[in-house]
Amino acid sequence: MVAEEADTDYRPVSASLAVLAGIAASDAICGHVLKKRSRAQEHRQAVDLLRTVRGAGGAARALDRLLDLKDAAQYGTTALSADRTRGAVKAAATVVDEMESILRT
């Protein structure tokens, strides 16, 4: 996994992709259930919308954690440790897993 690599240059890429995966999965959940998605510049509004979907509480919390890392991952505002990168990948997996579960219903 990229988070384990000695070369820390790849961590922001991994975390950034995790953030994007979480946002995309959130949009899929909201589109499927609510027939709309957040179009706001402020991504936190997507978390609020996702919280209105029954069964998506874990996804909303995970997306919120991902958005906490967005600037560091995408703009290099702070260094990303292996733990933070692993956390981002895990949070993205949570949103994607809940998306898959919700979309099956």
Image (cartoon, helix red, strand yellow):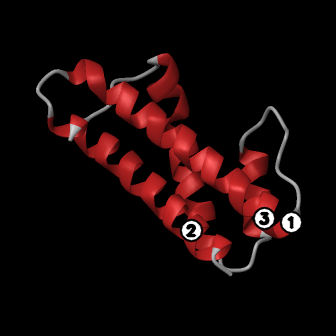
Residue that badge 2 annotates: 100
- Name the residue furthest front: 104
Instruction: Establish if 23 lies above or below 103.
Output: above
Residues at discs 1 and 3 in contact (Cβ within 8 Å):
yes
- The residue under the point 52% across, 59% down is 96
Mark 2 is surrounded, within 10 Å at the Cα level, by few (under 14), some (14 to 19) or many (20 or more) other residues, namely some
For disc 1, the marked residue is 34
Q: Amino acid at mark 1?
A: Leu
Q: Quadrant of the C terminus?
A: bottom right
**Is 102 above or below relative to 1?**
below
Which x, y percent locates residue 91?
45, 55
Left of 101 or right of it: where is 45? right
Q: CA distance from mark 3 to mark 2?
A: 11 Å
Crowd around label 3: few <14 · some 14–19 · many ≥20 (10 Å): some
Whether residue 56 is visible here, answered yes or no, is: no
Per the rendering, the mark at residue 21 is: none
Q: Is residue 91 left or right of residue 9?
A: right
> Of discs 1 and 2, which sits in the foreground?
2
Q: Secondary structure at mark 1?
A: helix
Which residue: 66% across, 55% down?
26
Who is closer to the viewer here, 59 or 1? 1
- Mark 1 surroundings within 10 Å by alpha-carbon count, few (fewer than 14), some (14 through 19), many (20 or more): some
Q: Inspect the image, locate mark 2, and give the three-letter code of the amino acid beneath it.
A: Glu
The residue where tag 3 is placed is 32
Please tell me which residue is depicted at 85% across the width and 40% down the height of the picture.
39
